[in-house]
Image (tube, rainbow, N blue to C red):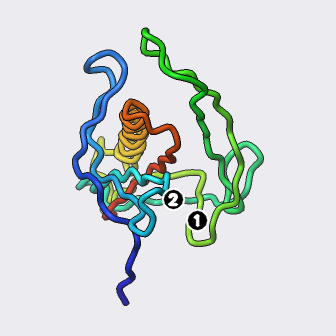
Amino acid sequence: MPTSSHWQASAVEFPVSFGLPGTFETRIDMILRDGRDPSSPWHLVVECKRAHPDYKQWVFFDRRDRVTKPGPDGLFIQRADFTGSWNHQGRIPLTQRIDRVAAPKECPVFNFYVETRLNPPKSGQRASATDAIEQAFRQASIGIVGLGRILHGMNRHYFRLLPIVVTDG
């Protein structure tokens, strides 16, 4: 049964960058906004990745709750709040903190991940890897920082960015 969502695409293949030219740049595959409430501060920064052809299955595991890591009953959110305006050197005045919040039942949280090979590896091949997953997470992280800079530059000071990685695996 198909489900509908109130999230609507506000941009696709949206270029973002920060740091020295060429240092951190990427394209955000999709930016979603709340279609019910145009004043909502939430933006979903979506990175879509296909599993590597040799490693067709992404596996997430270990749902035990730990004090130092996210677990099934809670996760950590990094929060950064602007505390003033940018100075002429491009520095952003922020206060940052880590908040622990309850994980919704619809969104399981895992501590570990690996991309596994479906067929037995040949001589010299790895049975698993983490490169594609970590690249997707890096790209989503660059996307939220770059989009945050753009929104702040547009004089928007109240926004929330949630990175999401989607895979076909």
On the rendered image, what quadrant is the C terminus found in? bottom left
Counting residues from the N terminus, which is met first, the one under dot 1 or under dot 2?
A: 2
Dot 2 surroundings within 10 Å: few (below 14), some, or many (20 or more)?
some
The image position of residue 113, as x and y in percent, is 50, 52
How many marks do you count on the picture? 2
Q: Nearer the viewer, mark 1 or mark 2?
A: 1
Dot 1 surroundings within 10 Å: few (below 14), some, or many (20 or more)?
some
**Quick one: 17 or 138, which is closer to the camera?**
17
Q: Residue furthest bottom?
A: 1
The image position of residue 51, as x and y in percent, is 30, 56
| Quarter location, residue 135 | top left
Looking at the rendered structure, the kind of residue marked 1 is: Pro
Image height of 56 relative to 90, above or below: below
Q: Which of the numbered marks, if any, corresponds to residue 35?
A: none
Q: Which of the numbered marks, if any, corresponds to residue 60?
A: 2
On the rendered image, what quadrant is the N terminus found in? bottom left
**Quick one: 48 or 94, which is closer to the camera?**
94
The image position of residue 11, as x and y in percent, is 26, 52
Q: Residue furthest top?
A: 89
- Do residues under tags 1 and 2 come within 8 Å of each other at their CB atoms? yes
Work out how far the residue at label 1 is from the one at label 2, CA to CA, in angstroms: 10 Å
**Quick one: 118 or 60, which is closer to the camera?**
60
* Disc 2 element: strand
* Disc 1 element: loop
Q: Which of the numbered marks, if any, corresponds to residue 108?
A: 1
Looking at the rendered structure, the kind of residue marked 2 is: Phe
The image position of residue 101, as x and y in percent, is 70, 54
Image height of 87 relative to 147, above or below: above
Residue at 51% x, 59% y is 60
Residue at 62% x, 46% y is 77
